[in-house]
Amino acid sequence: PKWVAAGSFAAILAFLSFLYFLTSWLDRLFDVRGRQKICLILEITGNILSLGALALMLEWRPQDAALAIGIYVVLQMIFSIIWLIFAYRVAEFGMKGLTLLLRDAVVSVGLAILFVGTIHYFLHGWPAFLVSAAVALCMIAISFVRYVSTGAALSSTTERFRQFWAE
């Protein structure tokens, strides 16, 4: 029972971790393009606002730490989206691709919340975890097919996996 709160915090922070996992590939882009100052300003601003909101919420309502962490996560997610927009501009990628990616992300998060919420409403403990993991893997597979698997790209990826395992 004393670890229930920690599990809630981990569940809330999992969304942010997944977002960082998806956007971290652009991390060195600012260094390569010589735009470290923009990245530094973004990082400092995002961290000050998020950590400041977390501290204020914990001071204002210390009994509701989950709400404080939730607000921290929402602010970090907003910061990550703003950071991603700047990264796309620095890389000179098309903004249309980013808007499509953002649309798909919003749909995916909505579906994930719906599916996982429904699963956890009916199941608890390990069964809920295993079914949620299966749903997450299916969603990742759908994303892979949507973004990666053109015929040539899929066969190329499959061939690289074969070569890797053959070594």
Image (cartoon, grey):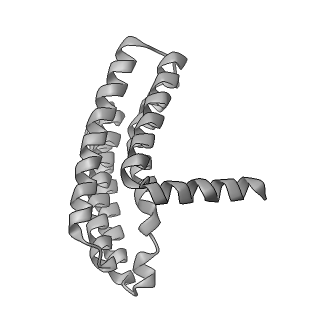
Left or right, residue 21 beside residue 84: right
Of 101 and 64, the residue lying toward us:
101
- Residue furthest bottom in the image: 34
Asked if 49 appears above or below 56 in the picture, the reply is below
Q: Which residue is drawn at 55% across and 60% down?
A: 156
Query: How far across and down, in percent of the image, does residue 16 sit?
Result: 39, 48
Q: Which residue is drawn at 38% across and 37% down?
A: 12
**Front-most of residues 56 and 148:** 148
Q: Tell me the quarter of the image containing the C terminus.
A: bottom right
Q: Nearer the viewer, residue 113 or 7?
A: 113
Q: Which residue is pictured at 43% across the width and 48% down the height?
A: 144
Which quadrant of the figure has residue 52?
A: bottom left
Question: In which image quadrant can residue 96 be found?
Answer: bottom left
| Image quadrant where residue 82 sits | bottom left
Residue, x 28% and y 55% (percent of image)?
101
Q: Is residue 16 visible?
A: no
For the question of whether residue 145 can be seen, the reply is yes
Residue 128, image x, y percentages: 47, 19
The residue positioned farthest toward the top in the image shown: 122
Which residue is more in the foreground, 151 or 98? 151
Report the number of discs: 0
Residue 86 in percent (x, y) is at 28, 72
